[in-house]
């Protein structure tokens, strides 16, 4: 595996100068975006990067980087391939490739952007990179569990982080007012940027709260939550890319359910009579169902393998202790 202290250091101990000169000659022949795309993909594969923050492979990661630098529409990679990059763009691409490999930071943090479907969000090191499968369910208005988006008048985004799900709640339930909750002031600062980006400041209220502690007596038609759910064993094995994200936003305790238990214990009192709770829990379905054998969890279909999201109506939730 190549050293991570610099992109151009050789895997081979002999003739390092010749290797550096060869790499320089290779880069000097790169002109078009397509040339640099193939080169960046090769570098990422050679470095054995970990993905999962917007892409899941070296080719897509390289394409994202190149299209961002070229300021070319992301849905037109084919049209971008013949474009000749300017000298400034080539330097920027080179710098990002080196930084991505040397630091193992997620590309989303380096570019200060992340995507959920067609929606772009600002992100930085203060928040985890958005990747919630709840977004797929919000795209269709939580049908069939919510009959009409117009019926949703109030919604809560628990553990909002970057505010991405609060934005999607606002966009897909246009009649609703939304509370977005997070315990970290730094995360709420990022969420505030995204509310401004989508002009939702007037409809989304950002609240610093440890889960439901500062929510008060509001009743919500929809509550969504993407809490920390990575169990202790998985936390110990996280690739370096994930270690650049805030640990408290990932760590869900010994079995990954520390926050989920608290949400289940308190959600009923905060839901309206026809309200629904939607929670993302990663790969913890078996653990959750073993812990709560009497709760009839619904597992909506998403693009993910397994069942990372559950849904419950108010009536299906346990009464608050």
Image (cartoon, rainbow, N blue to C red):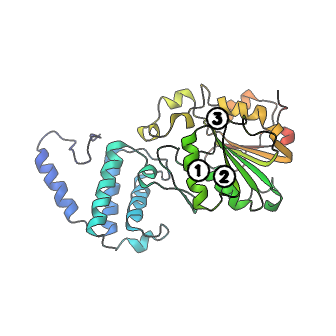
Q: Is residue 54 positioned above or below 306 on the image?
A: below
- Residue 5 lies left or right of residue 112; in this view the side is left
Which residue lies under the disc numbered 3?
Answer: 284
Mark 1 vs mark 2, CA separation in Å: 9 Å
Disc number lying in front (1 or 3): 1
Say which quadrant the C terminus sits in. top right
- Residue 146, horizontal then vertical, whole percent: 81, 55
Instruction: Report which residue position mark 2 lands on.
Output: 166
Disc 2 + disc 3, Cβ < 8 Å: no
Point out the frontmost of discs 1 and 2: 1
* Camera-side mark, 2 or 3: 2
Q: Earlier in the sequence, mark 1 or mark 2?
A: 2
Give me the disc on residue 191.
1
Between 72 and 152, the one nearer to me in the picture? 152
Out of 167 and 217, give the one closest to the viewer: 217
Point out the image quarter for the N terminus. top left
Evaluate if marks 1 and 2 touch, with contact meaning CB atoms under 8 Å apart.
yes
Can residue 120 be seen here? The reply is yes
- Dot 3 falls on a residue whose secondary structure is loop
Residues under labels 2 and 3: Cα distance? 24 Å
């Amino acid at each position: 595996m190549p050293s991570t202290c610099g992109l151009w250091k050789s895997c081979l101990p002999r003739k390092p100068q010749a290797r550096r000169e060869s790499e320089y000659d290779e880069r000097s022949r790169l002109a078009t975006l397509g040339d640099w795309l193939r080169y960046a993909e090769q570098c990422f594969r050679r470095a054995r990067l970990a993905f999962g923050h917007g892409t899941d492979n070296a080719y897509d990661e390289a394409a994202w980087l190149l299209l961002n630098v070229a300021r070319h529409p992301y849905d037109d990679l084919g049209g971008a391939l013949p474009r000749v990059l300017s000298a400034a763009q080539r330097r920027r691409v080179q710098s990002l490739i080196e930084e991505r490999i040397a630091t193992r930071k997620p590309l989303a943090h380096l570019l200060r952007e992340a995507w959920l479907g067609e929606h772009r969000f600002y992100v930085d090191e203060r928040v985890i990179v958005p990747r919630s499968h709840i977004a797929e369910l919000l795209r269709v208005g939580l049908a069939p569990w919510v009959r009409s988006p117009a019926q949703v008048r109030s919604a809560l985004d628990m553990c909002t982080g970057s505010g991405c799900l609060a934005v999607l709640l606002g966009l897909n339930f246009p009649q609703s007012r939304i509370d977005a909750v997070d315990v970290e002031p730094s995360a709420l600062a990022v969420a505030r940027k995204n509310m401004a980006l989508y002009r939702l400041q007037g409809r989304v209220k950002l609240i610093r709260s440890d889960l439901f502690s500062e929510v008060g007596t509001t009743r919500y038609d929809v509550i969504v939550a993407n809490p920390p759910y990575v169990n202790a064993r998985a936390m110990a094995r996280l690739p370096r890319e994930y270690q650049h994200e805030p640990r408290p936003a990932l760590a869900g305790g010994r079995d990954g359910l520390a926050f989920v238990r608290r949400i289940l214990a308190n959600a009923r009192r905060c839901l309206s009579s026809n309200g629904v709770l939607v929670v993302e829990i990663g790969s913890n379905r078996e653990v959750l169902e073993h812990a709560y054998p009497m709760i009839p969890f619904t597992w909506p279909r998403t693009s993910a393998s397994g069942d990372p999201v559950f849904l419950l109506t108010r009536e299906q939730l346990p009464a608050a202790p």
